[in-house]
Amino acid sequence: MKKVELPKKLTIAWLRKKYLKHELAPTEVIIEIIQRVKRDEGMNIWITSPNKDTIQPYLERLQTLDIDSSPLWGIPFAIKDNIDLANVPTTAGCPEYAYTPTEHSTVVARLIEAGAIPLGKTNLDQFATGLVGTRSPYGEAHNALRPELLSGGSSSGSAVAVARGHAVFSLGTDTAGSGRVPAALNDLVGLKPSLGAWPTKGVVPACASLDCVTVFSHSLEDAKKVDAVARGIDEHDPWSRQLPFPVQKLPEKICLPREPLAFFGPFANEYRAAWEQAISNLKQLNIPIEYIDDQLFSEAAAILYDGPYVAERWADIGGFIKEHPGSTFPVTEQVLRSATLPKYDAASVFQSIHRLQVLKRKASNLLKDAVLVMPTVGGTWTRDQVREDPIKTNSDMGRYTNHCNLLDLCAIAVPAEEAAANLPFGITFFAHSENEGLIIGAAEAFMNRNKGQEKKIYVAVCGLHMRGFLFEKQMHEFGAVFVKEAITAEKYQFIKLPTSPAKPGLIKKQTGGKAIELEIWEMPLHSFGEFAVLIPSPLGIGKVELQDGTEIPGFICEGYAADGSEDITDLGSWKKLEVKV
């Protein structure tokens, strides 16, 4: 087998292509990754580094898995060291706290089940308390592009590992921004699902009611693939909840802060200019822009550290700190012990909960069918500057992130244009927890805006390819995005074909037809031909006339198929048939 050189930016699609063509084996990938890790030893990325002997059982397990049915087959990933990997110590960034779990956390178990290869455990701000990446007794994690700058925290090592080519993707956690800040500072995508969408069983709690497991990757596509595996309720996790699977679509509007935002650090001017450029690029998406008062988000953010919610961190970690004096990173202990101040009594907790409920409702109403966009961070610092003022610099890093989980929002941080050479800048799309598809749709539109103005085509679907049905996943596989629900002109007969599974047929009539409900999706033109070839007779693609008289490509059926098929025209919708049966 000819030796294949691995790119610095590893992706799922690239590796799977090489695996399927038998041009590369997972063992070769692991050997190269271990060499890269040794090269970067001085960057303090790992706590438990990748080791061939530890990884070998996972490589051998791949021989029992079918690559076609294992979406993450042979894909190496890194794990933040507050997330359990069986038989590997979990330290949470504190050697005295370390324990060795006997089972995987739920998310890690799901990824391994899908064929992913766990590499080891990455560095973090101790007890996931910090946004800077400098609060670790295992050393300050270096920025992947400019070592003198912050890597971002608390998921510092996880982000840098992906950025330096040590892993295809990595797991982080996010309570106040830890799955987004490191993404922005290391030129990555950082997806923070809604609270409870990914189980947190097997994760050392920071604020258990606000904690999320997150993913870092080089592409939105890779983040979506990891999400598809990790998502879903765990009945053994009290914080887990059943949420709708994200259906990617564009928001009806983009909300931007009305007042000028504050920027900070030695590159404040560069960040401000990059934000203005990002706004200009957002306007190219042809999605309505609405400027809003962002005060409610600032008020919610303040509750996390300038209010009694910090006591939730102390509730989980305080006992250990009191029993192990001197074991905690000094600034981390200072932050956590602030929860014991007399002003944070029981009454103050409930006052904050009640105020937060008001803000949640306001945010939910404001973001109905909309996304909020903010800079992921408003600047950065050198690591030396953080040591000089560790509290204020860390606080600045969370200005545009801390509100998210408190308001029950989902978020995705994506790269925008650089603020300066090797100085990434990123923006974050926020939406309500039940509208995760909006941040995916908006982020993809933003990231693909300059990709040769890729041509797309509308496709009308009326049956199993609609949302919630068997072949919806095929639409996503071909890159299609749901646009809207629609109705045909009153010219169609609707039949149920005697196939397995049953499929609908849409037949245009000269007289006597009725209007049929359907969905309109947008598909990349380059995918459309391959998609159409897969459609079995008597179905096909033709022009479907909509209620307003316009015609777009869509599923149609040859007339002869009406013989021997059930006429369901009066139902007017495949969804109604499904309810009926």
Image: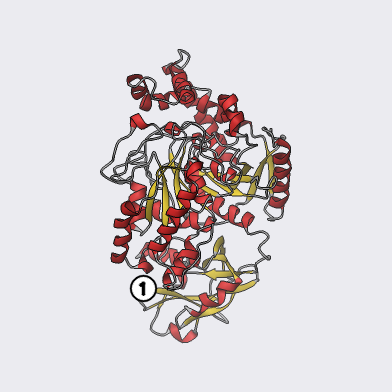
**Residue 423, image quadrant:** top right
Residue 303, horizontal then vertical, whole percent? 52, 26
What is the residue that sits farthest to the top in this orientation? 342
Residue 571 visible in this rendered orientation of the protein: no
Which residue is tagged 1? 501
Residue 158, horizontal then vertical, whole percent? 47, 45
Q: Helix or strand or loop: what does disc 1 sit on? A: loop
Vertical comparison of 55 with 87: above or below: below
Q: Amino acid at mark 1?
A: Pro
Residue 272 visible in this rendered orientation of the protein: yes
Residue 217, horizontal then vertical, whole percent? 51, 52
Q: How many marks?
A: 1
Q: Nearer the viewer, residue 344 or 538?
A: 344
Residue at the spot 61% in from the left edge and 50% down from the top edge: 415
Q: Quadrant of the C terminus?
A: bottom left
Q: Nearer the viewer, residue 69 or 146?
A: 146
Specify few, some or many for label 1: CA neighbours under 10 Å numbering under 14, 14-19, or 20 or more.
few
Residue 69, horizontal then vertical, whole percent? 36, 66
